[in-house]
Amino acid sequence: MVTAIKFSIILPTFNRAHMIHLAIESVLNQTYKDLELIIIDDGSTDKTKDIIDKYIEKDNRVKYLHQKNKERSAARNKGIKEAIGDWICFLDSDDIYHTNHLEEFKNLIKKTDSKRGLYFSGLSYGKYSESKEQYDLSHKNNIEFVLLNTIGTPRACVHKSIILKHQFNEKIRIGEDRELWSRILKNHPLYWHNKKTFIEIEHPNRSVNLGTEIENLKTLKLILKSKKNIRKTVKNKVLSNAYFKISKSKIKANKIIIAGYYIVLSLIYCLKHEQTRHKLMLLIAIYAAPNSHLVKGYKKH
């Protein structure tokens, strides 16, 4: 029997006073209203608290917690312990939910008869999109699924009984969500919908834009080493993708020669890849014409 569904949204933040109002309002404007928003201030030194206080005065669903700066995993874990909802969702202070984000999760949870597990939504960039998320469905198990598909924390909804047992590893700074999903999915089911109800806002100070690709590779290797039921072909594809991401970050940093090295690594790990032709063209451009439009395109984006 499906009981009433209450969501707790965990929102860590650090010095985002200039934009956190967008994230907060996207939660409070949800079509599904049975929720609480727990904001964990990870030691902000700007006017973050002043902004949040204004929302607390108007809406008793907003809660504020403060801690010394310990990074986002510690902040999320703190919020999880304080949550009263049976279903835990996450949001970063530089992103937003579309108004139907929780409604779609509610529908999916009811469809599964409230089975305790890990749920995901689709993702759009910059604004809401009616198009459907396209997942890589070549997986043979759920751990392979989260390795082949990048599922960021704000796309997740998980039953509180699970997340209390499997919390974020506070020693991992990048890829901590994927590492957590891989632990959860050893014993719990995975469900997803492909409606793009989470909206990622692009800006220069996103953590994923700050040279974190090497750290992400380390986390991926940690997952691959600790999990035994991942096929070699999947491992190779995952590593190939990671090395290609590093190569693109090196191009942006104008480290062209080392970027070529990482492209070669990417090709070695997975030559039969949908991007192989593109990688080869980029590799040729790097060594034959480093100022080509192809290379310059990666520097811009």
Image: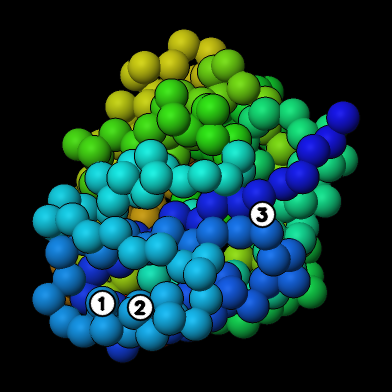
User: Mark 1, residues whose alpha carbon is within 10 Å: few (<14), some, or many (≥20)?
Assistant: some
Q: Is residue 69 above or below residue 235?
A: below
Q: Residue at x 77, y 45 (%)?
A: 4
Extreme residue toward the bottom, this view: 18
The image's mark for residue 121 is 3
93 relative to 108 in the view: left or right: left
15 relative to 297 in the view: left or right: left
What is the secondary structure assignment of the residue under circle 1? helix
Residue 215, position as x, y percentages in the image: 23, 46
Residue 133, position as x, y percentages in the image: 72, 59
Q: CA distance from mark 2 to mark 1?
A: 5 Å
What amino acid type should be assigned to the residue bearing mark 3? Ser
Count of labels shown?
3
Residues at discs 2 and 1 in contact (Cβ within 8 Å): yes
Q: Is residue 11 above or below residue 55?
A: above
Nearer the N terminus, badge 3 or badge 2?
A: 2
Asked whether the viewer can see residue 211, the reply is: no
Q: Nearer the viewer, mark 1 or mark 3?
A: 1
Q: Nearer the viewer, residue 218 or 192?
A: 192
What amino acid type should be assigned to the residue bearing mark 2? Ile
What amino acid type should be assigned to the residue bearing mark 1? Lys
Q: Is residue 86 above or below residue 214?
A: above
Asked whether the viewer can see residue 69, the reply is: yes
Find disc 1 in the rendering and name its residue: 49
